[in-house]
């Protein structure tokens, strides 16, 4: 009788362990696939956010720009092709355009030529962070770099392999573009693919004498 009871306890523990493992696997798959491509037709092209959402990790520091006080853009760290870490906060002194994208996202691919053209035109005055959401499955460092090279894009490519940027801006749909002024203040965000005119307007609005 005692052996039967012990056997039942052992079986119950095994079942519970199996459930925990299954739950962990399902949770991992859900999180790894949480970022979805944004259909540009579903996004209002005039909608921007003057500050990140509560879950986006907004900093307490404020930046002065053109007489107005802006919330500091949430900081994050990504990596260049050589594996060097680059943080948003280290880029103050120039306006910054951050674009979260992935190779598997059709709206992202739609707007990338506009970003490449903008980099060629404004690259001396504006810093571009083209941030690939490198999940290690759909996008890897190698596949994202190969995609960029094949398309002959010249903009600087960075990899969010730690999902630091995705967490800082609560990214759950892409493309997402963030405009940050030279003092590190959050100017606006844009969800969905942008046309060339909208992108240029966002950049020129951050340049001296344009605000």
Image (cartoon, rainbow, N blue to C red):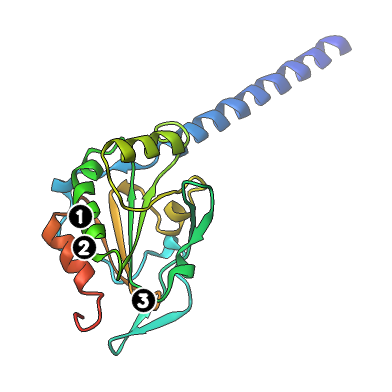
Left or right: where 13 falls relative to 132: right
The residue that label 1 is drawn on is 117
What residue appears at the point 30 percent right and 50 percent down from the top-left corner? 154
What residue appears at the point 54 percent right and 53 percent down from the top-left corner? 84
Closer to us: mark 2 or mark 3? 2
- From what the image shows, is residue 107 above or below residue 118? above
Of callouts 2 and 3, which one flags the residue occurring earlier in the amino acid sequence? 2
- Front in this rendered view, residue 2 or 192: 192
The residue that label 3 is drawn on is 182
Whether residue 1 is visible to the viewer of this picture, yes or no, is no
| Residue 153, image x, y percentages | 28, 46
What residue appears at the point 44 percent right and 41 percent down from the top-left corner? 134
| Residue 73, image x, y percentages | 40, 69
- C-alpha separation, residue under disc 1 versus residue under disc 3: 21 Å
- C-alpha separation, residue under disc 2 versus residue under disc 3: 18 Å
| Residue 6, image x, y percentages | 83, 16
What residue appears at the point 25 percent right and 75 percent down from the top-left corner? 206
- From what the image shows, is residue 94 above or below residue 106? below
Contact check, label 2 and label 1, Cβ < 8 Å = yes
The residue that label 2 is drawn on is 121
- C-alpha separation, residue under disc 2 versus residue under disc 1: 6 Å
- Quadrant where the N terminus sits is top right
């Amino acid at each position: 009788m005692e052996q039967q009871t012990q056997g039942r306890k052992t079986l119950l523990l095994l079942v519970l362990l199996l459930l925990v493992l299954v739950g962990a696997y399902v949770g991992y798959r859900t999180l790894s696939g949480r970022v979805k491509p944004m259909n540009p037709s579903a996004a209002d092209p005039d909608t921007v956010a003057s500050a990140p959402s509560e879950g986006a990790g907004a900093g307490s520091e404020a930046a002065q720009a053109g007489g107005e006080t802006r919330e500091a853009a949430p900081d994050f760290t990504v990596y260049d092709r050589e594996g060097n870490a680059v943080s948003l906060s280290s880029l103050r002194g120039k306006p910054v355009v951050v674009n979260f994208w992935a190779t598997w996202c059709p709206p992202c691919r739609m707007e990338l030529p506009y970003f490449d053209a903008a980099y060629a035109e404004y690259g001396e005055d504006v810093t571009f962070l083209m941030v690939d959401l490198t999940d290690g499955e759909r996008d890897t460092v190698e596949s994202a770099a190969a995609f960029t090279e094949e398309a002959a894009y010249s903009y600087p490519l960075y990899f969010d392999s730690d999902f630091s940027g995705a967490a800082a801006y609560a990214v759950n749909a892409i493309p997402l573009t963030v405009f940050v002024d030279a003092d590190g203040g959050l100017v606006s965000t844009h969800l969905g693919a942008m046309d060339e005119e909208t992108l240029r307007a966002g950049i020129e609005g951050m340049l001296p004498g344009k605000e």
